[in-house]
Amino acid sequence: MHAYETSRIALPLKPAQPASYGSAPLQPISFFPAGSEIYAQGEKAGAFYQVEFGAVRVYRLLADGRRQISAFHLAGETFGFEAGTTHHFFAEAINATGVRVFRLAAGTDMSHQLLPLALKGLTRAQEHLLVLGRQNAIERVAAFLIDMAERQGGLRQIELPMSRMDIGDYLGLTIETVSRVFTKLKEKGVIRLLNLRCVEIVKQDVLSNMGE
């Protein structure tokens, strides 16, 4: 992982459809430029967020100044759930991002609506821990690419709004290792790098086997 550095590449993803969550009032879309903070660690919680377009990274700064990214959120996905009254992580726009905020009124019971979203977030966190537990860097990157493809509708051509440094801080790898793995996968014909932020998966089965 590396010391924290802000990415300012703007690459909006497909807008999401507005969702309705019980009695939570539907708020207008808030726009966040690339690299801007959505909320900070230690700030008061009490709302959750849906990405309308763009992408968000959720992270924590370690004592030595390094950054550990715990999650990426793409268009249509929700984030910001907290067990306590304050945020335990930072949330930041990766690129030009639109976010819809759902604020929970005091005494409002939305457990029925929020439980499926919370369980989905828990499952994704558990899957991330399994990826970090793998020793092989190729396995980590392959699993990451498969996950991104699934979250973008199973397309073979996927957008990666995050930088190589972001990917490294998410997978527990250095930026040099991430770049080497991408190059190796390209040389083996498993993927095609269309540009810095767009990857085409050429051999889906091979990549899936690498990520298992």
Image (cartoon, rainbow, N blue to C red):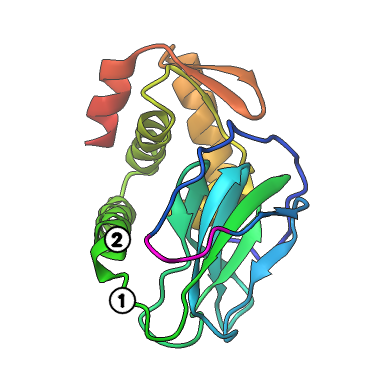
- Residue 106 placement: quadrant: bottom left
- Residue 117 placement: quadrant: bottom left
Give the magenta-colored segment's residue range.
22-26
* Number of other residues with Cα within 10 Å of mark 1, as a class: few under 14, some 14 to 19, many 20 or more: few
Residue type at mark 1 is Asp
Circle 1: element type: loop
Q: Residue at x 60, y 33 (%)?
A: 13
Quick one: 171 or 15, which is closer to the camera?
15
Query: Where is residue 148 drawn, in percent x and y?
Result: 43, 35
Give the vertical position of 46 relative to 174 (above or below): below
Give the vertical position of 47 relative to 124 (above or below): below
Give yes or no for residue 23 being in the magenta stretch. Answer: yes
Does the CB distance between marks 2 and 1 fall below 8 Å? Answer: no
Query: Where is residue 47 drawn, in percent x and y?
Result: 50, 72
Q: How many marks?
A: 2
Query: Where is residue 59 drawn, in percent x and y?
Result: 54, 66
Q: Is residue 99 left or right of 117 when viewed as pictured?
A: right
Q: Residue at x 50, y 38 (%)?
A: 17
Q: Which mark is residue 208?
A: none
Q: Quadrant of the C terminus?
A: top left
Q: Residue at x 34, y 38 (%)?
A: 143
Secondary structure predominantly adopted by residues drawn in magenta: loop
* Number of other residues with Cα within 10 Å of mark 2, as a class: few under 14, some 14 to 19, many 20 or more: few
Residue type at mark 2 is Gln
Q: Which mark is residue 109?
A: 1
Q: Quadrant of the N terminus?
A: bottom right
Quick one: 5 or 112, which is closer to the camera?
112
Decide if residue 156 is in sight here: yes
Q: Which mark is residue 113?
A: 2
Circle 2: element type: helix
